[in-house]
Image (cartoon, rainbow, N blue to C red):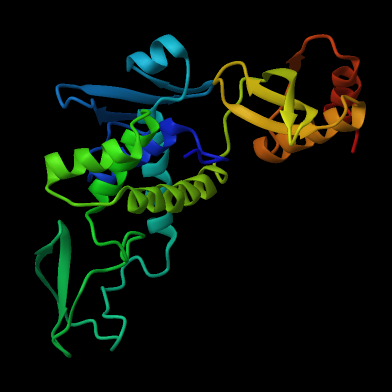
Amino acid sequence: MVLSNLPDPRAIRGYAIIAKGDVITQINGNTFTVPSQNGNGLYHVTKLDSGWTCTCPDHTYRKVECKHIHAVKFWIAIKEKLQTSKSEDAPIRYKWCGSPLIIKYGHEAGKQVYKCKLCNRKFVPDNGFGKLKYDPKIITATLDLYFKGVSLRKIADHLKQFYGLNVNFTTIYKWIKEYVKIMGDYVKTLVPEISGTIHADEMMVKVGGEWKWLWSVIDEGTRFLLASQISATREIHDARRLFQKIKEKIRGQRVNKVITDGLRAYEDAFKKEFFTLR
């Protein structure tokens, strides 16, 4: 089974890191520590004027935004959302009776359970995983295994052996579809910090039995995929549509240079989209 329009697997793994608990530590305004996967050390994530850096091998050697950088970005975004929320300091309330008289009442399936002292009902606050039967750590571990290339049936077998859970592979597929969409929607809100130099290329692909052009543009510094599209032609209007997508994503940041295979449509479209007085 293949899912389309997936977010970067590293972003999923970054989300899995913060889902495990409060493991990210802010050293100063721009530096954070994130535990390594094996738990034997810490990686330092730093925000510079030129972008994000991490001391992990994935970022050091591949020059990509690793899962640790994504984890810090998610952590910052969640923290800012909580700080600006009008209900930040509001007590937990039971949704059925509205009572704030709430006490902690043990755990079920790894989740904190609360009890309403007014109506004596137990509940688990909905944190995005509220309707799921299993611990969010199980869900994020499942996503991580899937994006490492493990099949759905093998994931189900893994959950049974290591967690004692009998989960059908179709349930796992539903988790993946649901949370990939959630993550994809969130990732779309992130603004990549580009280097100013982008690489654009196009290649022929068969779509529905017909040959089309697949356009892709990545940032040279972060290797972030800025835009992609499929078109029937390679004309100026196609290239302009591609650059318009980039402008919308980078939100005012400047693109100084585009490296291409020499297609003239890029040059004309680049001048019209990035060097006009509009």
Q: Is residue 106 above or below residue 7?
A: below
Rendering coords of residue 173 (x, y %) = 39, 48
Q: Quadrant of residue 253?
A: top right
What residue sits 16% from the left and 44% below the top?
A: 160
Say which of 54 and 163 sits in front.
163
Q: Is residue 263 above or below residue 127?
A: above
Rendering coords of residue 130 (x, y %) = 31, 64
Q: Quadrant of residue 123?
A: bottom left
Rendering coords of residue 267 (x, y %) = 87, 18
> Please, which residue is most extreme toward the front here?
209
Q: Is residue 80 visible?
A: no
> Please, which residue is most extreme toward the left here?
106
Say which of 228 and 187 sits in front.
228
In this image, 145 relative to 157: left or right?
Answer: right
In this image, 205 relative to 62: left or right?
Answer: right
Q: Quadrant of residue 132?
A: bottom left
Quarter the C terminus occupies: top right
Number of disc labels: 0
In this image, 20 relative to 224: left or right?
Answer: left
What residue sits 73% from the left and 17% below the top?
A: 201
Q: Is residue 191 visible?
A: yes
What residue sits 67% from the left and 20% below the top?
A: 196
Rendering coords of residue 264 (x, y %) = 90, 15
Say which of 139 and 191 sits in front.
139
Q: Is residue 236 above or below residue 221?
A: below
